[in-house]
Image (cartoon, rainbow, N blue to C red):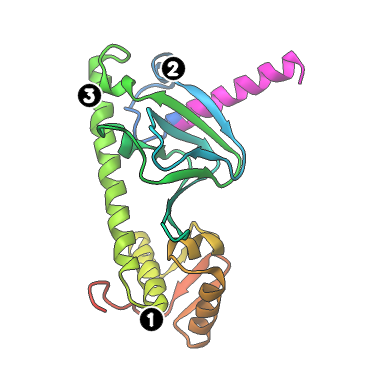
Amino acid sequence: MNMNNKNEKDVKQTDTALEVLCRCHLIPDMEPEQIRREILPLGHLRHYGPGSQIFLKQDAVDWIGILLDGRVRLLQLFENGEESLIDLLGPPQVLAADLAFTRTRRSIYYAEAAEEVLLFRMPVTVLTEPGSLRPEVRTEMISRLLRIVSHDNMKRAYHLSILSQSGLRSRILTYLTMQAEKRGTRELTIPFSREEMARYLCVNRSALSHELAGMQREGLIRFRKNRFTLLTPAPDPGQE
């Protein structure tokens, strides 16, 4: 890559970063030029190829990331070698928000790039220590981080509620119903591929595909790829 092409790429990535940061819930309502001047210099851009590890379980994560492009999987690995998909993040979501104010900042899960990822990473000290940001901006960002973490905790609680269902069919219907209620429609597109959906529900892909096909034959759902229509109410998540 010659110098001109490199400079053009850097300018394009900076413009992408600025556009996404303007939409990120962590960043206070600021003019784009303010974000360019006050936020961008506090971090740096990092690239990750598909399937690469962003951090591992037990890694100390001393930064907060904002996804600019691509998707990141958050995964839990169990002692028996199985893994569960905790969440799937995309722009402009925040990565490692839940680790920022913990004592050790060591992760209990690992994060991998589901595809080509561009990430804006800021040191945690930007928020934990005064000086890098204007006091009012730092206070607002901490408040916003708290809301993000609270929202993430609710998503984890929903996930546990889904996994508490005794059968695969109940897990599927509970997940789809929660998504339908969130969107206000019984026709929805889920963010997961079939493999990701299986990992989220803690089952193998063939079992999931078999169950989905049976549910469609029985008139419970219609689906094509990741587009689903719920045709019957799901069981109450609080009941087995």
Query: Which quadrant holds the N terminus?
Result: top right
Q: Residue at x 41, y 24 (%)?
A: 122
Mark closer to the observer (1, 3): 3
Separation of marks 2 and 3 at Cα, in angstroms: 20 Å
Residue that mark 2 sits on: 33
The part of the image, by quadrant, that contains residue 110 is top left
Residue 232's tag is 1
Q: Which residue is mark 3?
A: 139
Whether residue 68 is situated above or below residue 150 in the rendered picture: above
State which mark lies toward you, 2 or 3: 3
- Give the mark nearer the N terminus: 1 vs 3: 3
* Label 2–label 3 contact, CB within 8 A: no
Residue 7 is covered by the magenta coloring = yes
Question: Residue 229 in the image: x percent, y percent?
Answer: 47, 73
Say which quarter of the image contains residue 159.
bottom left
- Please name the amino acid that badge 1 sits on: Thr
Q: Residue at the location (25% across, 40% down)?
A: 147
Q: Using the numbered discs, state the Cα–Cα distance from disc 1 to disc 3 in whole angstroms.
A: 46 Å
**Does residue 21 sit above or below 10 in this rendering?**
below
The residue mark sitting in front, 2 or 1, is 1
Write the start and end of the magenta stretch as one range: 1-20
Prevalent SS, magenta region: helix
* Quarter occupied by the C terminus: bottom left
